[in-house]
Amino acid sequence: MDLVVFLPLLLVMGAFMFFASRRQRKQMQATIDLHNSLKVGDRVHTTSGLQGTIARIDDDNVDLEIAPGVVTTWMKLAVRDRIEAETEAVEEVSSTAVEEGAPKTEG
């Protein structure tokens, strides 16, 4: 009798755990696919928010050029995502629009 009361709760918890683990596996596979597809010249974000261009890549590490002539070495796992060219274009247009729309002050 007591087991019948807990059965719906156990079913809901089991379904939740199944779907949560499935989502986590999909995210992990997407990250693995990203890391396998990285190449020299790609613009990337790191998990700490740094943007850079891949200058060199090997099995475990990437060298990111974060400013002209400034290259830092990172673990490949620190790369969060690739910055797409269209995203950069939108950011440039947005920053230009903000600068043009800002009120001019005369001193």
Image (cartoon, rainbow, N blue to C red):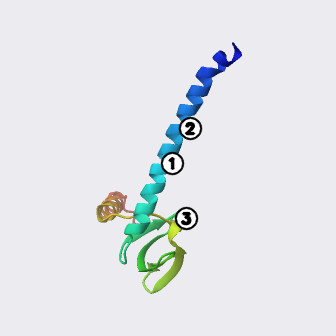
Q: Are marks 1 and 2 in contact (CB under 8 Å)?
A: no
Q: Position of residue 53 (x, y in %)?
A: 41, 75
Q: Position of residue 56 (x, y in %)?
A: 43, 81
Q: Position of residue 7 (x, y in %)?
A: 61, 21
Looking at the figure, which quarter contains the N terminus? top right
Would you say residue 107 is visible in this rendering? no
Q: Are marks 2 and 3 in contact (CB under 8 Å)?
A: no
Measure how far apart labels 1 and 2 are at the Cα level: 10 Å
Residue at screen point 45% across, 87% down? 69
The residue most toward the top is 1
How many discs appear? 3
The circle on residue 17 is 2
Would you say residue 8 is visible in this rendering? yes
Q: In the shown orientation, is residue 102 left or right of residue 20?
A: left
- Identify the element where label 3 is drawn: loop
For the residue marked with disc 3, what is the amino acid?
Ser
Looking at the figure, which quarter contains the C terminus? bottom left
The residue that mark 3 highlights is: 48
Residue at screen point 67% across, 19% down? 3
Vertical placement of 64 versus 86: above or below?
below
For the residue marked with disc 2, what is the amino acid?
Met
- Identify the element where label 1 is drawn: helix
Measure how far apart labels 2 and 3 are at the Cα level: 29 Å
Residue at screen point 53% across, 75% down? 74
Residue at screen point 49% across, 50% down? 25
Location of residue 84 (image quadrant): bottom left
The residue that mark 1 highlights is: 24
Measure how far apart labels 1 and 3 are at the Cα level: 21 Å
Q: In the shown orientation, is residue 56 left or right of residue 100?
A: right
Dot 1 or dot 2, earlier in sequence: 2
Q: Are marks 1 and 3 in contact (CB under 8 Å)?
A: no
